[in-house]
Amino acid sequence: MSLLLGAVADDFTGATDLCNTLVRRGMRTVQLIDVPPPGTPVPQADAVVIALKSRTVPAPDAIRMSLKALAWLREAAARQFLFKYCSTFDSTPEGNIGPVAEAMLDTLDGDFTIFCPAFPENARTIFKGYLFVGDVLLSESGMRDHPLTPMRDPSLVRVLQAQSKGKVGLVQHAAVGRGPAAIREAFAILRRDGCRHAIVDAVADDDLAAIGEACADLPLITGGSGIALGLPENFRRAGLLGAGGGADTLPPVAGPAAVLSGSCSVATRAQVAHMSERAPVFTIDPLGHDVAAAALAWAADRLGPAPILISATAPPEQVAAIQEKLGRDEAGARVEHIMADVARGLAERGVRRLVVAGGETAGAVVQALGVTGLRIGRQIDPGVPWTTSLDEKPIALALKSGNFGAPDFFMRAFTVLDEVTR
């Protein structure tokens, strides 16, 4: 089997989100946790997504990690490459989206690429270069107060230009709405004007399909998971991809269930509140002593088929108070360390079905569990599928971006898992 698409994602839940999009379009997809060692066989899949933890590290480290992943995918002979970041363009004035994309583009000897984090199914749209979350600008959404990457400017052209060496242009919806040929023409105009990067408007899935078709010949594409909607069909038109039936099939997994929530987003806070009324909950205090041990002791007599919740989710004012005492980086690292220890302890106690909320938390958990790769299954909510580890005795994992999912996501996730593994 020839590897068609090789992708590098800057966090774990974002990688799963991308895999979900590809599977839904009929591409058999595997998510790898970090870059495999040299000599590791290429998975039998149409697409491979390498999940990194590079979104909030210093830009030079993010570049190094991303180029290492790109090198592995090139060695695996992928035909096209994608750099995946969050649909809310999570970043800082220094990067990491612009610097990583430029380094990857240089490595591939490319002269032009696009940036399109739109995901209309999850209410992320771009119009005239401005990113909207639902009906409000990004700067007026909950991302304004994100503890690690607060987004205060909704103009993606300005945000990207501040962190890029190359000139940034814009393909407006007036061109996107006319289809792939008009989009390619807009690309050509921007290239003639000296632009190396293009923010591309998108307000509907049809826009993303057209953009994907227009990008068939680009060596590198960058965006959120939505940008992948149009890519599988490019490979089908080229005779490289079949119909894709059964791409989301997973092996059955039974055992106790748990939810670990480390995100403090508006969406996750609503999910924690919903589950708290329906299931046992243990609240993590990052300032406490032996917190992981206390959480595991609490869980011992509560584990079973019905899920329990262990949560570090907190409102902005509480997060700010903890960060003031510990520092932003130390506060985040402490929560990740606690959640990693809890996940490891739960697995030792037989938990085989696990939902994890928050990209940084998900990264810490999968690393603690020694997971090296995931097979992607059925979607629970837009952007979030069930997965199973590639181990001989698989564990079922749903890795949820903090911003994604309806309020009942945690409880409904296990209903979906029961349906697909019955």
Image (cartoon, rainbow, N blue to C red):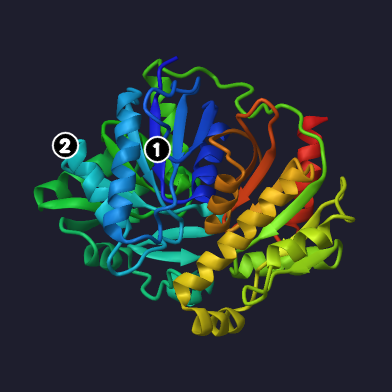
The residue at the point 16 percent across, 36 percent down is 109
Left or right relative to 55: residue 12:
right
Which residue matches tag 1?
Answer: 7
Mark 1 → mark 2, Cα distance in angstroms: 17 Å
- The secondary element bearing badge 1 is classed as strand
To which quarter of the image does residue 388 belong? top right
- The secondary element bearing badge 2 is classed as loop
Left or right relative to 5: residue 422:
right
Which residue matches tag 2?
Answer: 109
To which quarter of the image does residue 282 belong? bottom right
Of the residues shown, which amino acid type is indicated by label 2?
A: Asp
The residue carrying pointer 2 sits among few (fewer than 14), some (14 to 19) or many (20 or more) residues within 10 Å by Cα, namely few
- Camera-nearest residue between 34 and 274: 34
The residue carrying pointer 1 sits among few (fewer than 14), some (14 to 19) or many (20 or more) residues within 10 Å by Cα, namely many
Of the residues shown, which amino acid type is indicated by label 1?
A: Ala
Q: Where residue 126 sits: x, y (%)?
A: 40, 59
The residue at the point 58 percent across, 79 percent down is 316
Left or right relative to 117: residue 221:
left
Q: Where residue 413 sits: x, y (%)?
A: 74, 48
Whether 27 is drawn above or below 319: the answer is above
- Camera-nearest residue between 371 and 198: 371
Q: In which quarter of the image is the C terminus?
A: top right
Q: Where residue 132 sits: x, y (%)?
A: 46, 66
Q: Which of marks 1 and 2 is nearer the N terminus?
A: 1
Query: How many labels sit on residues?
Result: 2
The residue at the point 79 percent across, 47 percent down is 257
- Camera-nearest residue between 302 and 127: 302
The residue at the point 28 percent across, 42 percent down is 67
Q: Is residue 344 visible?
A: yes
Q: Quadrant of the N terminus?
A: top left
